[in-house]
Image (cartoon, helix red, strand yellow):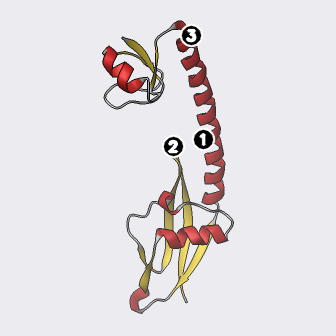
Amino acid sequence: MEVILREDVSNLGKSGELVKVKPGYARNYLLPRGLAYEATEGNKKRIQAEAKARVTRQAAEKAEAEGVAAKLSALAIRIAAKAGEENRLFGSITAQDIADALAQAGHPVDKRKIELEHPIKTLGFHAIPVRVHHEVQAEVKLTVVAE
């Protein structure tokens, strides 16, 4: 049986592809979950329209993300923390601390989008990568100063 995938299905194919599957798999799994349509002429046109809408939506999301990334890249934030000898912090600066500082600056960002390899434990300048979109990344300039 031929079906048109509506969403990506692992080990089968990507959205919009025409694939051949066993009738039971299509009838019992793909069709009831809305993952695929039968490969009729009407459904082929429907999938093409959905693909065009998806491409348009993704382009708009990427353009919006690039605008946000430009604003974040131009932003420089300061975080004050208690420090000891040799410019070492008593605690550390985490992604949550950076997200809070960005929110105070008027640019709320989810802490999971801040890509810190490890918490910051030293004073000074740090470039922090922020994943705004799966194709767009910004770099926020962070300065950690002693309290």
First of labels 1, 2 by sequence position: 1
Label drawn at residue 42:
3
Marks 1 & 2, CB-CB < 8 Å contact:
yes
Q: Element at badge 2?
A: loop
Label drawn at residue 81:
none
Q: Quadrant of residue 28?
A: top left
Q: CA distance from mark 1 to mark 2?
A: 8 Å
Identify residue for label 2: 135
Q: Element at badge 3?
A: helix
Q: CA distance from mark 3 to mark 2?
A: 33 Å
Q: Quadrant of residue 29?
A: top left
- Mark 1 vs mark 3: give the one in front: 3
Give amino acid for label 3.
Gly
1 left or right, relative to 114: left
Identify residue for label 1: 62
Q: Is residue 94 above or below residue 146?
A: above
Between residues 97 and 4, which one lies in front from this camera angle? 4
Q: Element at badge 1?
A: helix
Q: Is residue 117 above or below residue 60?
A: below
